[in-house]
Image (spheres, coloured by chain):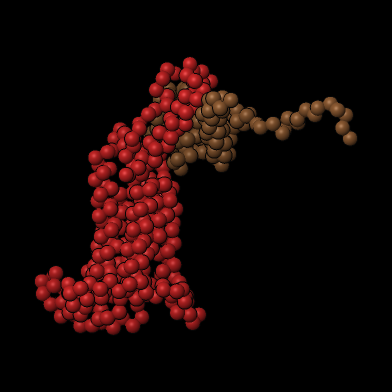
Amino acid sequence: VDEDIPSDRAAPGDGPPEDGAGSQASAASPDAEVGGMLAEMSALRRRVRSDRHAYWLPLLLFGLIGLGSVPFNLSNPGLHFLGGNHGFACTDYATPAFPALDGPNGCPTPLTGLLGLYWLLALTGGFLVVLTWYRAYARRSGVTSRARATVITGIALTVAAVVVPPLAQAVGYPFELGIPYLAFFTFRGTYPFFIIAVSICVLAWAERSRALTMIAITYLAATMTAGLYDVQNVVSRLGYWSDSQWYRYVPNMALPTGVLLLSGAAVALVRLRHRPSAVAR
Amino acid sequence: MTSGVPEIPAESAQPKHPTNGIDERVHQRHRLGVLTITAEAERAEFGYLREALGLTPGNLSRHLAVLEEAGLVMVEKGYHGRRPRTWVRITRQGRAALAAEMATLTELLRQHRAQPRATAAD
């Protein structure tokens, strides 16, 4: 059950205009009066919650951003989707510009060398789009969410991913700072998905949505699985493709990205069918 | 030492009736509605409150004035393009007052519902 769909659109002030305490006078029993008041407040709370939910766009947006990272994760030989083997030679990126955002090791192509830059621009741009979206949505609906917290979290983690590695290396630490298992995320190039996952968890808190909380937990689990577990090897062992193929890293990207795209599309569809009155005005 | 006169229990020892804790500024359907809406959103627009509570602009303004004077909400005026917009935000005091009112109402309801059973048991 998605709590986005209001089951009750009761407006407590539907009665005649009142002048202050007048609305408290009622012929109903105190039990019914108090119970009715509590039910009205509960219905109001559900209505406001439904009216301010606008999280389908961040889900779809970050799903598309994840999808956009796939070409950067293809390894040589051959970018077949461009029409054949272009014969890129392995390029030596000994010191990647953004080690926490860059892709997995292997045989990098000119595109894979730009993966870190892609994530930096896509994440920063994505979070700014989310901020703009929520501001515009608040003006339209009349109620605002605490989406700023999501944007601050996302941008802070992105900036940390860019700033911390060179600083750590400058003082002689490994760039993962010895944080347990963090190396798995950077090794497989899934750390950016982790940034998105944490931000969506913060968004679930800001939106106070059970549906989004479930999506955030599922996405976080998918990201952890892709980062900590060798999804590409599992898929390879199942016989779907060889681990040596040029798209061998795609399963790592596909798992979290698929969760976001599917859930975002489902939420958008439900939203389209049950448009809140505050937005439809 | 006892005097033989039965002791009158101190007032504080008696169970307090839930209505003793009612704040008259909050215990009003529409003002409670304003607090409920603004507690659920970061802030709510005047037009949204008016429509959700089914109030006239004048009525809503009067309720907001009461709540603002009590420090339970903050009213922010601004513009969106050339259109003036008024936003209402709940304060920390407002959240506390809302929580207290909801607790009082829930307790009142619980006591009312428990009463017939207690009477029947006698």
Instruction: Name the residue: 43% across, 58% down.
Output: A153
A245 and B82: which is toward the camera: A245
Total numbered badges shown on the rendered structure: 0
Looking at the picture, tell me which residue is in the foreground, A153 or A205.
A205
Q: Colour of chain B?
A: brown
Q: Is residue A234 left or right of residue A169?
A: left
Please tell me in which quadrant of the rendered image residue B40 appears: top left
Q: Position of residue B96 (x, y in %)?
A: 57, 39
Display colour for chain A: red
Residue at the limit of the structure toward the top, as seen here:
A27
The part of the image, by quadrant, that contains residue A99 is bottom left
| Residue B50 visible in the snapshot | no
Q: Is residue A219 above or below residue A141?
A: below
- Quadrant in the picture for residue A3: top left
User: Up-down: is A49 above or below A176?
Assistant: above
Point out residue A7 in the picture as x, y percentages from the top left corner: 33, 35
Q: Residue at x 56, y 42 (%)?
A: B92
> Who's the residue at 78% across and 27% down the image?
B8
Residue drawn 47% across the image and 24% down it:
A32
Question: Looking at the picture, how far across and down is residue A184, in whole percent?
Answer: 37, 74
Q: Of all residues shown, which one is farthest toward the front? A: B122
Relative to the observer, which residue lies in front, B19 or A124?
A: B19
